[in-house]
Each structure stands twice: as C-alpha cells, then as structure tokens.
Amino acid sequence: MLLLDTHALIWLATDLTQLTDVAKAAIRSHALELHVSSITALEISLLTQCGKLEWGKNPLSRFQRALEHHGINEVPIDSAIAWESGQLPSIHRDPFDRIIIATAMEHKMTILTKDRIIPTYPKIKAVWE
C-alpha cells in the first residue's frame, strides 16, 4: 500500500513532470492500493487559502475528483493515528507530516514523498528517488 504525501498528490493531479521516475513507477505498481490521509485535504485547503496553490474556484471538488480519477482511497484520521502522531520522536515538527507518518505506521504503508526527514523515522519506508 502506498500513502501519498500532499505534494505527491498535487503533482499527480497537476504536473506529472514533478514526479521522479521512481515515484511514477511506485504509483503504477500500486495503482490498486493508492491512499491519501484526510489531513491532506486540510493542507491543500490552507495552501489554497494563503495563495500558495491555485486549484480553481472549488479546490475541495478538485481534491475529490483527483482521488476519484486516480482511484485513491482516503484514510481518515482516527484516535489511534492522532495519538501516535503526538507520540512520535520530535524529528519532524510539521503536524501534517506527523499525521501522514502515523497513518503509514498504523496501516503499514510506504510513503511516497520527496521529504528527506520522513524516512529517518524508525519503521518508516518511503520512496521518491
């Protein structure tokens, strides 16, 4: 199972040239088991609100269409994931990434991310390059 970091979902939906060949191969080989944390919706919402991401007049609809178009399953944040994200070592301070890391741990997923800090967590497998 492959869990897409927020930037991986954005680039999959808008600009495939930003994805590495390894990332594209991982997406193809996990085509039936692609996932995204529901925290990604919040992160995209904040990015569009502050003007760092242009996703049209209805970013939520675009987010939902991207999930549907690529067959991506949304993983909700439950109390176990929320708790685990708070218990992680203080390697990464970004709360979005901490939720993504905890989600991957809870569901034994590989994370598709260009972030170089995420793979330093114990028991986390990540792919990009």
Image (cartoon, rainbow, N blue to C red):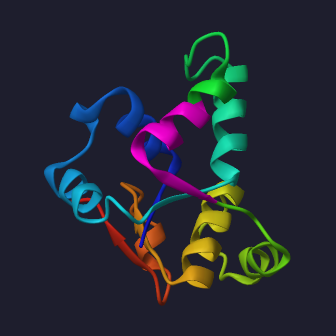
Relative to residue 46, is residue 30 depicted above or below? below
Residue drawn where x is 68% and y is 53% of the image: 38
Residue drawn where x is 54% and y is 75% of the image: 104
Q: Is residue 2 left or right of residue 20?
A: right
The quadrant of the picture occupied by the N terminus is bottom left
Relative to residue 21, is residue 34 depicted above or below? below
Magenta stretch: give its range: 63-74
Residue drawn where x is 67% and y is 42% of the image: 41
Residue 87 image-quadrant placement: bottom right
**Residue 19 inside the magenta-drawn segment:** no
Q: Percent position (x, y) of residue 78?
A: 80, 71
**Residue 65 inside the magenta-drawn segment:** yes
User: Can residue 53 be seen by looking at this rendering?
Assistant: yes
Report the front residue among 57 and 90. 57
Q: Is residue 72 left or right of residue 113?
A: right
Can you name the residue that lies furthest to the top here?
57
Tell me which secondary structure the magenta stretch mostly adopts: helix
Residue 50 image-quadrant placement: top right
Residue 36 image-quadrant placement: bottom right
